[in-house]
Image: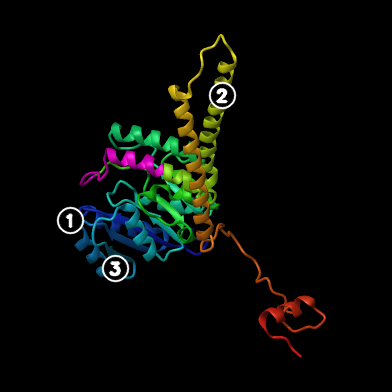
Amino acid sequence: MADSIPPAVSFVIPAMDESDSLARLYQEIEKVCIAENLSHQIVFVDDGSTDSSWQIMRDLASEHPDHCVAVKLRRNFGKAAALSAGFDVATGDIVITMDADLQDDPKEIPRFLEKMDAGFDVVSGWKKVRHDPWHKVLPSRVFNWTVSKLTGVNLHDHNCGFKAYRRGIFDEVKLYGELHRFVPVLAASKGWRVGEIEVEHHARAFGRSKYGVSRLIKGFLDLMTIYFLTAFSGRPLHFIGGAGLVCFAMGGIGMFYLSVMWGITRLSESMEDLHLHRTAIFFYCILAILLGSQFLVTGLLAELMVSQSREREQPYSIAERVGNGFQSGLLSGDENDPLATDASHRSGQVEN
């Protein structure tokens, strides 16, 4: 780090009722940044605190206007919204997110930057040794394993709030709801490189956790959203229409079987006549066909909506571009150059 230009690093720290830890966290981050000669910016976001958190944030920003910014939300909008507000303010080439409860150790910051220098665009922390009760650790591990297997982004700790990102990621990845824990997954779907490092995890020194059992339930619902967005956002008919074809096929096969049996029972004197309206499977087959038709129509409507939105959204992510793509003769009016003539016609500048 000493032989290269120090990167501009922004720290985005959302907080709700963390007045006891904010000043100490700021001092520890400052200490690391000074030791590493980092050009830095610390962005505190007050997400609807009811204690003195905002007053402390505002005092820190007033005392250190060159390094600190304080943002106050009008009410509690949730962590994803608070992070988005911080990202909009952050100006660093690299953005590091941290929790405000002192469980994330600022001494890990240089290791995050070293990992970024190795060619990664997102680096997630892994709290291998957690100082949390078992009823939070066990469901979290099940959740992390499920996310990794379903999305293909193999991280041990998707829930860890200690992460580092390249600033350009947030030009392509927009947060809403509670999707903040899935930024690495969304970034990976755009082609950004994702890695992780082990980080030290401290026991909470002040306050209490803001998350309960509902977080796990919401997390799995959000996982369904992420899986759909990353795998089928550009082709919803493949997902919805696939389910429709399965239902339609099952209903069609059932109806074909019932139709054949209806005819056979009437041609055979040894078999009792099959009455469709007395057979429960007949109604299930009709229901399956109707559901399949509705799924297919819904999938086509979703494709129409995606085609309209894609006109305003780029379906790709550019990693690098070299050259401006123009040659000096193209727009010079050279009559012997057909490309130049074509360019002149397109620009309305045809020379006589």
Gap between marks 3 and 1, in whole Å? 24 Å
- Of the two numbered discs 3 and 1 on the same chain, state the one appearing first in sequence: 1
Label number found at residue 257: 2
Within the image, what quadrant is residue 287 found in? Answer: top left
Front residue of 70 and 237: 237
Circle nearer the viewer, 3 or 1: 1
Residue 281 seen by the camera: yes
Residue at the disc numbered 1: 50
Q: Residue at x 60, y 16 (%)?
A: 267
Label number found at residue 315: none
Q: Position of residue 75 (x, y in %)?
A: 23, 58
Residue, far right: 336
**Element type at mark 2:** helix
**Element type at mark 3:** loop
Task: Determine if the magenta segment contains residue 222.
Answer: yes
Residue at the disc numbered 3: 64
Q: Amino acid at mark 2?
A: Tyr
Q: Residue at x 23, y 57 (%)?
A: 48
Could you tell whether 239 is left or right of 207 in the image? right
Label 2: few (<14), some (14–19) or many (≥20) C-alpha neighbours in 10 Å: few
Could you tell whether 216 is left or right of 318 in the image? left
Above/below status of 304 relative to 199: below
